[in-house]
Image (spheres, helix red, strand yellow):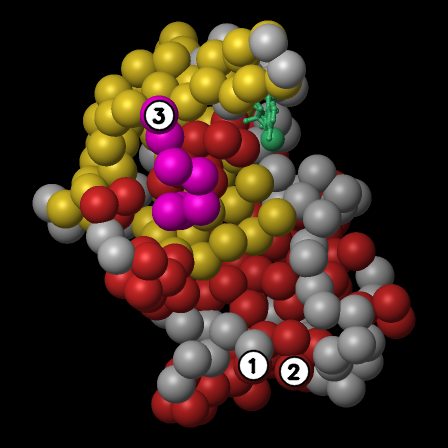
Amino acid sequence: MLGIRKVTKKYYKGAMEFTALDNVSLEIRKGDYIVISGPSGAGKSTLLYIAGGMIRPDSGEVLYNGGNIYNLAAKEKNEYRKKHVGFVFQQFHLMPFLTVKENIMLACYEKSLCAKIDTLMEQCSLTGLRDKYPSELSVGEKQRTAFLRAIITEPEILLADEPTGNLDPANSEILMSLMNDFNKKGGTILLVSHSPEASKYAQKKISLINGKIVINH
Ligand SMILES: Nc1ncnc2c1ncn2[C@@H]1O[C@H](COP(=O)(O)OP(=O)(O)O)[C@@H](O)[C@H]1O
Ligand SMILES: [Mg+2]
């Protein structure tokens, strides 16, 4: 479904060059649940955002159903991000002046996508919080809102960058269980996480060190 082929990405700071990803290849199939771990600075976020059509690699390809997303016109690349990919970040990135329900509705690019919002909010234990603002929520509630915003559009692939990084163990478990449900219903997940609890549902675990995949089991 998503083929990351020989992707290299360098960053430049003045005259300094830093290789964040070094010739990385990864095959993601429909229904996969892959967890990526590795030390800080290893290139994990870069890999996730390259997969999501947000950072153009210097070389290599990201093939979505056979075509390189970085060869698409801007409008089509936007469509890929909007319709086929869901993102969850460690820092939630909710809109502060929108309520829980409004934040989730932001992602609904078609009215029909919001049809299931009440049922899904119930499943994520957010019903009673629908009219609250992010500043009134606990971190667990914020992340469940961000998760639902990411999956309300039924994306083929969910990209999650250390989503439990700010959560306590109980809230991490709730989020991981919701992500597992998404996977069981056919959703594909690429999850960056260090925590063993976070990876227990994953079928495939890989490690990134210095921009290279070192363990692939
Ligand atoms: N925009 C940027 N400009 C310069 N260097 C960057 C930029 N983004 C990331 N880096 C560097 O690239 C390396 C990999 O970053 P990242 O993908 O965020 O790693 P990880 O998520 O594994 O911590 C780090 O050393 C980081 O400092
Ligand atoms: Mg990171």
**Quarter of image, ligand 1:** top right
Q: Where residue 92 appears, x then y in whole percent? A: 69, 55
Q: Is mark 2 within 8 Å of ligand 2?
A: no
| CB-based contact (under 8 Å), mark 1 and mark 3 | no
Local crowd at mark 1 within 10 Å, few (<14), some, or many (≥20)? many
Residue assigned mark 3: 58
Residue depicted at 42% across the width and 52% down the height: 158
| CB-based contact (under 8 Å), mark 1 and mark 2 | yes
Res 68 quadrant in image: top left
Residue assigned mark 1: 105
SS for dot 3 = loop
Vertical placement of residue 145 versus 174, above or below: below
SS for dot 1 = helix
Going from N to C along the chain, the mark reached first, 1 or 3, is 3
Q: Which disc, if any, is residue 102?
A: 2
Q: Where residue 200 appears, x then y in whole percent? A: 50, 34
Please indicate whether residue 16 sits to the left or right of residue 51 in the image.
right
SS for dot 2 = helix
Instruction: Verify whether residue 89 appears in magenta.
Output: no
Q: Tell me the kind of residue under disc 1.
A: Met
Res 32 quadrant in image: top left
Distance from the alpha carbon under mark 2 to that under mark 3 = 37 Å
Residue depicted at 59% across the width and 8% down the height: 16
Nearest to viewer (mark 1 / mark 3): 3
Inspect this view and state whether residue 144 appears: no
Q: Tell me the kind of residue under disc 2.
A: Glu
Vertical placement of residue 19 versus 153, above or below: above
Vertical placement of residue 10 versus 109, above or below: above
Total marks drawn? 3
Q: Which residues are magenta?
A: 52-58
